[in-house]
Image (cartoon, rainbow, N blue to C red):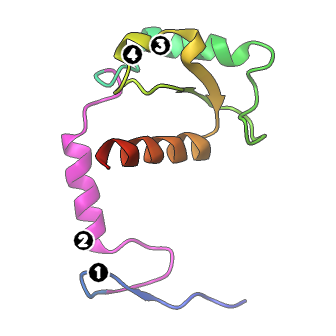
């Protein structure tokens, strides 16, 4: 079975395939310390209960990519529209991959 070769990180260290460089691990830890918890970002107990009920309803069990939906994504993010946090017309069922991609696109659009 072929193995991928190691890569060179931007810091110059040689990193085995499938692993993060120590500089990336430190950067991630610093980000996690600064990041507010889920409740502070708008995903409190009230939202969790409502989201679980939403996913249990017929027609909300699949993401738009066809994968099983395991979370509720906001069409207009909570950062841009905090008043629509509990608005079910602003929700859609999502898998982790689609939610991460949408979040990345939203952050990229806001920084451009």
Q: In x, y percent, where is residue 82?
A: 35, 16
- Does the residue at mark 3 contact the one at mark 4 (Cβ under 8 Å)? yes
Label 3 sits on a secondary structure element that is: helix
Rendering quarter of residue 46: top left
Taking depth in this image into account, of 44 and 90 the one nearest to the observer is: 90
Q: CA distance from mark 2 to mark 3?
A: 35 Å
- Does the residue at mark 4 contact the one at mark 2 (Cβ under 8 Å)? no
Q: In x, y percent, where is residue 86?
A: 48, 9
- Which segment did they paint magenta? 14-39
Check disc 4 and report the residue beneath it.
Answer: 44
Q: Residues within 10 Å of mark 2 (few under 14, many from 20)?
A: few
Picture layout, residue 60 above or below residue 6 = above
Check disc 3 and report the residue beneath it.
Answer: 47
Asked if residue 37 is among those painted magenta in the image, a careful observer would answer: yes
Q: Residue at x 29, y 87 (%)?
A: 13
Q: Nearer the viewer, mark 1 or mark 4?
A: 1
Check disc 1 and report the residue beneath it.
Answer: 10
Q: Residue at x 73, y 89 (%)?
A: 1
Picture layout, residue 98 above or below residue 63 = below
Rendering quarter of residue 39: top left
Disc assigned to residue 23: 2
Q: Residues within 10 Å of mark 4 (few under 14, many from 20)?
A: few
Q: Earlier in the sequence, mark 1 or mark 3?
A: 1
Label 1 sits on a secondary structure element that is: loop
């Amino acid at each position: 079975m072929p193995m991928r070769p190691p890569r060179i990180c931007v810091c110059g260290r040689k990193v085995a395939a499938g692993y993060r460089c120590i500089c990336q691990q430190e950067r991630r830890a610093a980000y996690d310390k600064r990041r507010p918890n889920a409740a502070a970002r708008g995903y409190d107990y009230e939202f969790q209960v409502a989201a679980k009920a939403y996913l249990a309803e017929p027609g909300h069990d699949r993401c738009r990519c066809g994968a099983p939906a395991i979370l509720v994504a906001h069409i207009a993010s909570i950062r841009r529209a905090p008043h629509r946090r509990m608005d079910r017309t602003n929700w859609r069922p999502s898998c982790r991959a689609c939610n991460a991609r949408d979040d990345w696109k939203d952050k990229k659009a806001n920084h451009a």
